[in-house]
Image (cartoon, rainbow, N blue to C red):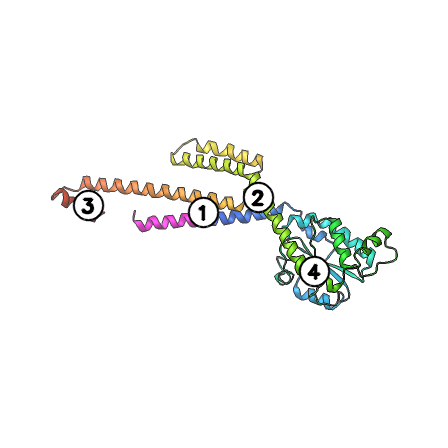
Amino acid sequence: MKKSNIQHLFTHLVLSFVIFSAISGIQHKTEAKGSLPDNWWEQSLAKPIHSSQEYFDLLGGEGKNKFVFIDFYMEYCSWCYYILADFNQLIEDMNEWYGEEKVEFIKVDGNKIKKLQELYKVPSYPYFVAVVPGTNGKTYSAFKYQPRNYDTLKKWMLEVMATTPMKDQTPSSVVAEESTYKQVTVPQMQQQMPQATAQAQKQVHTSMISNAIKDIGSQQNTQNKKMEELIQLLESALKDDPSMGGQQQPEQQKTEQAGVQLSPATYILLGLIGGTLASVTLIAYVSRQNVKQRKAKMRREPSSGSPLTRSLDEEKSA
């Protein structure tokens, strides 16, 4: 087998494993989305916005004199789903306290409407923004509190609405709480926005790093064990171990029972390791075949010339 053929096979193997790794990553993402209820975002009481033009039409039309609260979400965002019940409750409460003529609630899929995602510098999901009336979306407040729940969302919304009168039938406890935020004005809100956004992004990034470290720590032992088992299976394959087929089925059952989900990075790593080992095995096999062919050729051809001349002739023929 020629050298060019070996390179072709090696390239083919590497590309195959890269494609396999990419498909595995997409499958992992699909499984994460599949763990949520179908079309869960339709349960939101907020008005859906399907384009940036529809959003600006709302600001210039029926929402011109309203505080517009935006829920930025993604379809496969689990935290977006978990906060939905609290957000729906606040939609009902805010409409009761202030009236639908003063507040508007909308939902935006930030992954689909990139223009609004970039306009409000959405760092992660879910992300909540309150737009001040009459500013065409340019003056806004971003939710910055942790954790995200009913109480913190309520505190933020009352801060935004602090200078807006409540309806007469609003519970006295809510009126008293809202009165503590009277000192927050629109000019002050504009000054606080860069700091609030930076703080929210810092909190989100810190939380993401912390969760990533915890996830790595919890999965490290399991992934190490999986790696050892994979190496054992590959070694068995290299040795032409006939029992490999019998070992694979119990291992598959064990994985299904444990319910371990490897990350896309792990799939890529396993694919590269498997591709490398397979390529090394193929090259070694081809090299052995070439050696056997040369030896067979030497046995068939009559010897001529000196040993030095014969060696040079053999190298030329090789």
**Horizontal and vertical percent for residue 315?**
21, 47
Query: What is the spatial separation of the Cα atoms under label 4 and label 3, in whole angstroms?
Result: 82 Å
* Labels 4 and 2: the sequence-earlier one: 4
Kind of element beneath mark 2:
helix
Residues packed near mark 1 inside 10 Å, few (<14), some (14 to 19) or many (20 plus): many
Q: Are marks 1 and 4 in contact (CB under 8 Å)?
A: no
- What is the number of the mark on residue 314? 3
- What is the number of the mark on residue 17? 1
Can the viewer see residue 38 in this picture?
Answer: no
* Labels 2 and 1: the sequence-earlier one: 1
Query: What is the spatial separation of the Cα atoms under label 4 and label 2, in whole angstroms?
Result: 32 Å
Which amino acid, mark 3? Glu
Q: Which residues are magenta?
A: 1-17
Residue 207 vs residue 167, the one in the foreground: 207
Kind of element beneath mark 1:
helix
Quarter-of-image position of residue 67: bottom right
Kind of element beneath mark 3:
helix
State left or right for residue 279 relative to residue 291: right
42 in magenta:
no
Residue at position x 72%, y 53% in the image? 44
Tag 2 residue: 213
**Horizontal and vertical percent for residue 225?**
50, 35
Which amino acid, mark 4? Gln
Kind of element beneath mark 4:
helix
